[in-house]
Image: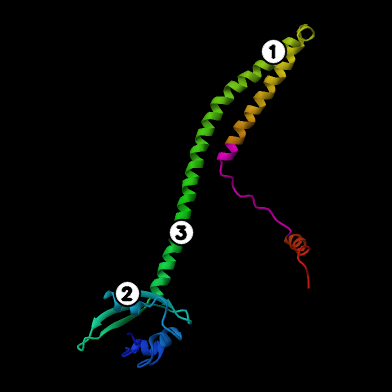
Amino acid sequence: MMDYVVEYQNRLLVERFGDLKGKLCYEGYYGRKKPCEICALRQAIESGRSEVREVKTEDGRIYEFRFIPFTDASGVTKAVEVTTDIGERKNAEEALRVASDELREVRGELIRAEKLAAIGQLASGVGHELRNPLGAIRNAVFYVRRRIAKSALPATEPKVLEFLDIIDGEVNSANKVINDLLGFSRIAKPTVSPVNIGGIIEDALKHVPMP
């Protein structure tokens, strides 16, 4: 049966946790009244393998506790607890994680920018190829209107002018689609203009209940 009694501490443990020799480990290290539910010390002794735990203390320090089981000269199974302050390492890991996230975000933005640039090139080419025939159609409609105006056709064939109006409308719609596509593919520069911040604050305060 395990007794959880601390038999020896090195100088670092004494400085950080106080002299716990002869005291129960879960009381001295963790401030508990009973053994931990998942006790790495017990698991190490029962399995015969090293166990590692990370613990954050009340003062914010982060320690790695490594429990190494062994059998002493009298045949009693015990464990050596190697404690390492890993706060700096954890801070470095967190800084690396943040940098990695930022790098991933920048990479995503670059990929999106490259895709938009490719769409822009495609849209520019498509727009050029489509605007030429659309311009020819519009010129043809204009020419036909002029010829019709000098003839008796509008009176005998009123549908002709209606169809010309439809063609004009479809040409305008097609040009709008081209302009929208070109506008979407461009990365617009931010527009900077002065703002009356006082008015914004005053408007926001109207929605905040005052004590």
Observer-side mark, 1 or 3, equals 3
Q: Left or right: 116 with respect to 155? A: left
Compared with residue 187, is residue 166 higher up or lower down, i.e. above or below? above
Q: Are marks 3 and 2 in contact (CB under 8 Å)?
A: no
Name the amino acid, label 3. Asp
List the residue tagged with mark 3: 101
Residue occupied by mark 1: 144
Provide the secondary structure element on which disc 1 rests: helix
- Quadrant in which the C terminus appears: bottom right
Q: Distance from label 1 to label 3 (Cα)?
A: 62 Å
Magenta residue check for 193? yes
Question: What x and y, as percent, mark residue 44?
Answer: 31, 77
Residue flagged by tag 1: what amino acid is it? Val
Q: Amino acid at mark 2?
A: Glu
Question: In the structure shown, which secondary structural element does the residue marked by tag 2 occupy?
Answer: strand
- Label 2, on which residue? 51
Q: On the image, which quarter does residue 11 sit in?
A: bottom left
Which residue is painted at 46% across and 59% down in the image?
101
Quadrant placement of the N terminus: bottom left
Cα–Cα gap, marks 3 and 2: 31 Å
- Where is residue 52? Give x, y as percent: 34, 74
> What percent of the width, then of the height, locates residue 8?
31, 90
Mark 3 element type: helix
Tell me which label, 2 or 1, sits earlier in the chain: 2
Say which label, 1 or 3, has the lower sequence index.
3
Which of the two marks, 2 or 1, is nearer to us in this view?
2
Q: What's the magenta bit mostly, secondary-structure-wise?
A: loop
Image: magenta residue range? 182-196
Crowdedness near tag 2: few (<14), some (14–19) or many (≥20) residues, C-alpha within 10 Å: some
Q: Name which residue lies at 32% across and 82% down.
A: 81
Number of residues whose C-alpha sits closer than 10 Å to that of mark 3, classed few (under 14), some (14–19) or many (20 or more): few
